[in-house]
């Protein structure tokens, strides 16, 4: 089956939302294949976010992502890459649709980076690359 990388970002772990996020993934019918708690370092984050290097939100994003533990999850299922992006909702939590993880559980805190609880790979190429980095 197709696989994707889901990250519960440091805001999600700190707010004790890991269980709620896992619940939504399982309730949708996807399989949890592997899971671990990671304290990400700069090298890992630079590789993970290589597409964003040089953008104005890059530094605050990396600082946020290294600010505390992350839960990394290998999730499997038919069309899971697209399916998890749909469960997560759009990037900006203020306007993410109700019913989604970001729409229901995240908001704008007036910080330099969007703290939007989760990451999900955005293509089969990204998923393969990111899963190799985190697992
Ligand atoms: P991920 O699943 O985390 O990759 O989110 P995404 O695919 O919805 O967003 P994207 O890959 O474009 O950006 C990665 C992360 O950078 C986002 O999840 C946000 O935390 C942050 N980010 C992206 N765009 C902006 C922006 O325009 N402003 C700010 N402040 N943060 C942003
Ligand atoms: Mg992305």
Image: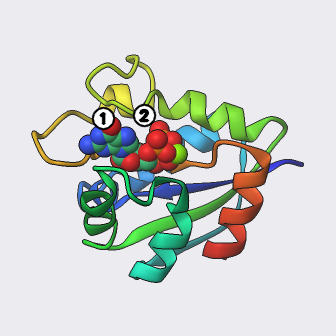
**Looking at the image, which residue is at 28% across and 63% down?**
59
Residue furthest to the front: 54
Vertical side of 46 occupied by 121: above or below:
above
Measuring from the top left, give residue 68's x and y in whole percent.
Answer: 28, 73
User: Which residue occupies the foreground of this view, 81 or 14?
Assistant: 81
**Looking at the image, which residue is at 47% across and 28% down?**
89
User: Which residue occupies the foreground of this view, 16 or 71?
Assistant: 71
Mark 2–mark 1 distance (CA, rounded to whole Å): 6 Å
Tell me the number on the disc at residue 101. Answer: 2
Circle 1 residue? 105
Whether disc 2's CB lies below 8 Å from ligand 1 is answered: no
Task: Tell whether 93 sits left or right of 37.
Answer: left
**Looking at the image, which residue is at 60% across and 62% down?**
73
Q: Is residue 77 visible?
A: yes
Measuring from the top left, give residue 122's x and y in whole percent.
Answer: 64, 42
Measuring from the top left, give residue 44's x and y in whole percent.
Answer: 50, 77
Residue 70 figure quarter = bottom left
Residue 103 figure quarter = top left
Bin the neighbour count of mark 1 within 10 Å (Cα to Cα): few under 14, some 14-19, many 20 and up.
Answer: some
Task: Tell whether 5 sits left or right of 42.
Answer: right
Number of numbered discs on residues: 2
User: Which residue occupies the foreground of this view, 56 or 124?
Assistant: 56
Q: Tag 2, which secondary structure?
A: helix
Bin the neighbour count of mark 2 within 10 Å (Cα to Cα): few under 14, some 14-19, many 20 and up.
Answer: many
Measuring from the top left, give residue 51's x and y in whole percent.
Answer: 54, 54
Q: Tag 1, which secondary structure?
A: helix
Whether disc 1's CB lies below 8 Å from ligand 1 is answered: no
Residue furthest to the right: 1
**Looking at the image, which residue is at 10% across and 39% down?**
110
Q: Quadrant of the C terminus?
A: bottom right
Q: Are marks 2 and 1 in contact (CB under 8 Å)?
A: yes
């Amino acid at each position: 089956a197709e696989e994707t990388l889901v990250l519960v970002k440091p805001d999600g772990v700190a707010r004790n939302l890991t269980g709620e996020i896992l619940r939504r993934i399982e309730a949708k019918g996807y399989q949890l294949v592997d899971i671990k708690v990671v304290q990400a370092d700069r090298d890992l984050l630079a590789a993970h976010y290589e597409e964003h290097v040089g953008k104005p939100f890059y530094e605050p994003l990396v600082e946020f992502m290294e600010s505390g533990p992350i839960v990394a999850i290998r999730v499997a299922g038919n069309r899971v890459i697209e399916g998890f992006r749909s469960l997560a909702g759009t990037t900006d939590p203020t306007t993410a649709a109700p019913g989604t993880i970001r729409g229901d559980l995240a908001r704008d805190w007036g910080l330099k980076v969007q703290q939007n609880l989760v990451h999900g790979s955005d293509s089969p190429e990204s998923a393969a690359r990111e899963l190799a980095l985190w697992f």
